[in-house]
Amino acid sequence: MWKEKVMPMTIGLVLHMPFVKTLLSYRTGGTIESKYCYSVWLRHLKMFNSVRNGVPKRVAELGPGDSLGIGFAALLSGCESFRAFDVIKYWNVERNLKIFEELIILFKNKASIPDNTEYPKVQPQLDTYEFPDKILSEEILKESLSESRLEAIREEIKNPGNPRNTLVKFYVPWDDYKVISPNSVDFVYSQAVLEHVEDLDGTYVAFSRWLKKGGIMSHSIDFKCHRTTKRWNGHRTYSEFEWKIVKGGRMFLINRLPYSVHQKLHTKNGFKILKELPVITANDIPRNKFSKRFRNISEEDMTTSDAYMLSVKES
């Protein structure tokens, strides 16, 4: 195992150097593509409709990344408002406008949802990738894609800091759930973000505060190593000291927390899990090779490489 750790730890040491920190490229991937944003949003929308009919009115996304494209897709589906929360402002107005215009075309054409052939790593997987016309009827699309509404969204994208904006608002950085009013959101979602969050407890508290009672939460979580080792779960073989070296000067990397932590935080914060879709991947690392912190985790935690979770706020 030591040989597998040498290169990630060496890179981490380099990233500790002050002059290297200034050269770090803060780019997250994914949301630079309109088709990716379209695919992710419609997957979450279809999962929402597996327990609740229609389009949620007020939606919030944690960690939108390189664009606000997934939220724009929500607005083009008929959502009334979109709130974005991140620790760093990765996106810019030019990229947002480009992706917004491309999304308009996808919705007007009722394009099929890009499936696992195009995005094999995107969760959750669906039974069918046809455009959800039973959810997004002609009547809904006529209103959500009207020229007056599209122009209103464009104006807010062009002027992101305008305090009078009502359709699109962002909070960067956010460090307190009080940044928005309690019980003011109908639907919270994230896509491959919660594995990066350092203060996971505080984040689940925020979800509970933001969502109204009966609100729905939808999260896709990636528990893999994110290229920190050759094996998908090798990141849990690092000691705490070694992991600090691997993390380097980066503000965050991955929190290494297993699936069961999310299950417990759902219960702790008043959520009832409605659907769980874990992806099980074989573990070929002997338990005694894992760090002390992870050596005794459950077999489920040891082999869950991804998971999708859909829940409702009960209290």
Image (cartoon, rainbow, N blue to C red):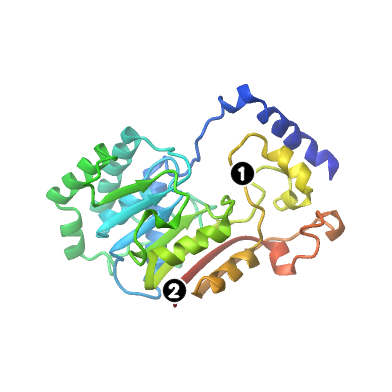
The three-letter code of the residue at mark 2 reads Val
The first of marks 1 and 2 along the sequence is 1
SS for dot 1: loop
Q: On the rendered image, what quadrant is the N terminus found in?
A: top right
Residue corresponding to mark 1:
253
Report x, y in % for residue 265.
57, 68
Real-space CA distance between mark 1 and mark 2, rounded to the nearest whole angstrom:
28 Å
Q: Please give left or right for residue 3 compared with residue 159 in the image.
A: right
Task: Check disc 2: other Cα within 10 Å, few if <14, some if 14-19, many if 20+.
Answer: many
Report x, y in % for residue 187.
37, 64
| Up/down of 285 relative to 51, above or below | above
Q: Residue at x 15, y 52 (%)?
A: 146
Any part of residue 113 in sight: no
Q: Residue 70 versus residue 33: which sits nearer the camera? A: 70
Q: Residue 20 versus residue 140: which sits nearer the camera? A: 20
Locate residue 213: give its quadrant.
bottom left
Q: Residue at x 16, y 58 (%)?
A: 143
Q: Residue 184 versus residue 129: which sits nearer the camera? A: 184
Number of labelled discs?
2
Residue corresponding to mark 2:
312
| Up/down of 87 relative to 194, above or below | above
Any part of residue 190 in sight: yes
Q: Which mark is residue 146?
A: none
Q: Are marks 1 and 2 in contact (CB under 8 Å)?
A: no
Q: Please give left or right for residue 47 compared with residue 298 in the image.
A: left
Task: Check disc 1: other Cα within 10 Å, few if <14, some if 14-19, many if 20+.
Answer: some
SS for dot 2: strand
Report x, y in % for residue 181.
34, 60
Q: On the rendered image, what quadrant is the C terminus found in?
A: bottom left
List the single residue furthest toward the top: 19
Report x, y in % for residue 283.
76, 59
